[in-house]
Image: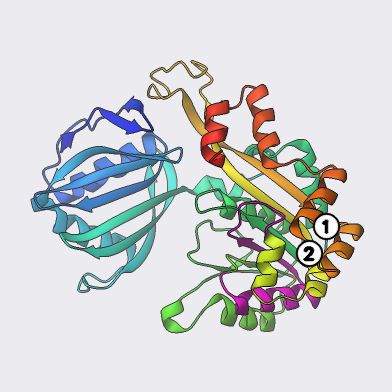
Amino acid sequence: MNTKTDIDNSSEKFSVHFPVDPHTAAEAIDQVLNFASCVRASDVHCDPRRDDTVIRFRVDGQIGEVGTIPGRLHDEMISRLKILSGARTDIHAVPQDGRWRTVLDGLECNIRISFMPTYHGENAVIRLLPAATSTDLSFAKLGFTPDHVRLMHDAMKNTNGLILVTGPTGSGKTTTLHTCLSLKAREPLSIITLEDPVEYEIPGVRQVHIRNAQGVTFGSGLRSALRQDPDVIMVGEIRDSETARVAVHTALTGHLVLSTLHTNSAIEAIPRLVDMGVDHYLLASTLRLIVAQRLVRTMCRECFALGCEKCRDTGYEGRSVIAEVCEIDSEMRSLISTKSTAAALFDHALVDGFCPIIEDGMEKVEWGITSREEVLRVLNV
């Protein structure tokens, strides 16, 4: 493997390298995955070009090229990855997904992989999910403040209603939802999830992989899940009007429903659901809590953002949540049911003690958890 010693991440650099060149596809896969685990990469991209395959890692949300693999090994490497993940080796023109479990850098790891046909061959994107993560989740460890933790724990005590986690792709919504489920799984409850795909395995929870090609959508899956006698249902994402309406009616009929939505703020989730066809009075009756979140890189504890070997000269190591948490109280319900504007809802939330996400981020800057530049970068302000 040709190595690259510097990765550019928003004008930042950190040094990585592969110790030896692979002679076989098996060696290439072992080297890439073990090194990815060693540097805490969440994703590995294997992108074919005309003469070689570019390997890129995503570390703490930032992606950069770490090296290349000879083109002669690419097809064999893809075939081996398909065998490992249970994908079909005789299909090359259609996207496929797979998964397997292995040990990397001494730790058990769940691996999810996506194959996609491209101009120069099949691309593979691998997500690494440490198995221990699914059983070691807590709101505090994710970075939520004590006030946010209290609100979230109070909301999880409800036996019915709708709890939403919002934010863009890659903001940690799935991890937050699985933290909620890991808490509920400690109770004698019937819990079922609908996910695309299943990322974390949670003992005692029935987890369903959504398969749109086979007709198993979030909407149809949710209707089927209701016949499985659930107490708690997690819907991986509310993507369309059908899923939104079924989720709200499910929450109205005595079930606790947890889901995600792509909005920039907590308050924006309300008009978004209305746009999807959910009546105001139903939202007012079912909403319990809305969380909006992002992930910011945390400053390295060794060098405090100066750059060192531990953080690969980036000044950052790991990530933390910054968030805003909106509790739906009786007055907020009244405002929702009377079709108040988002601005009016926001003003009420502020009076009720709501802390906007930018303030939570700046508070973490004051605590020395992250930097002002990082907060502004993530929030695009």
Q: Position of residue 367 (x, y in %)?
A: 67, 23
The residue at the point 61 percent across, 26 percent down is 369
Dot 1 surroundings within 10 Å: few (below 14), some, or many (20 or more)? many
Instruction: Tell me if 203 is positioned left or right of 343 in this view.
Output: left
Instruction: Tell me if 277 is positioned left or right of 102 in this view.
Output: right
> Can residue 105 be seen from the camera position used here?
no
Q: Position of residue 163 (x, y in %)?
A: 73, 61
Tag 2's secondary structure? strand
Up/down of 19 relative to 259, above or below: above
Check the picture and name the quadrant holding the N terminus.
top left
Residue in front for this viewpoint, 277 or 197: 277
Give the quadrant of residue 162: bottom right
| Amino acid at circle 1 | Ile
According to the picture, the residue beneath numbered tag 1 turns out to be: 328
Dot 2 surroundings within 10 Å: few (below 14), some, or many (20 or more)? many
> Can residue 365 be seen from the camera position used here?
yes
Up/down of 209 relative to 310, above or below: below
Instruction: Tell me if 365 is positioned left or right of 356 in this view.
Output: left
Q: Work out how far the residue at label 2 is from the one at label 1, CA to CA, in angstroms.
A: 6 Å
Give the quadrant of residue 309: top left
| Amino acid at circle 2 | Leu
- Give yes or no for residue 140 being in the magenta stretch: no
Instruction: Tell me if 62 is positioned left or right of 338 in this view.
Output: left
The residue at the point 71 percent across, 70 percent down is 190
Q: How many marks?
A: 2
Tag 1's secondary structure? loop
Range of the magenta residues?
239-268
Q: Are marks 2 and 1 in contact (CB under 8 Å)?
A: yes
According to the picture, the residue beneath numbered tag 2 turns out to be: 287
- Give yes or no for residue 242 being in the magenta stretch: yes
Q: Position of residue 254 (x, y in %)?
A: 81, 74
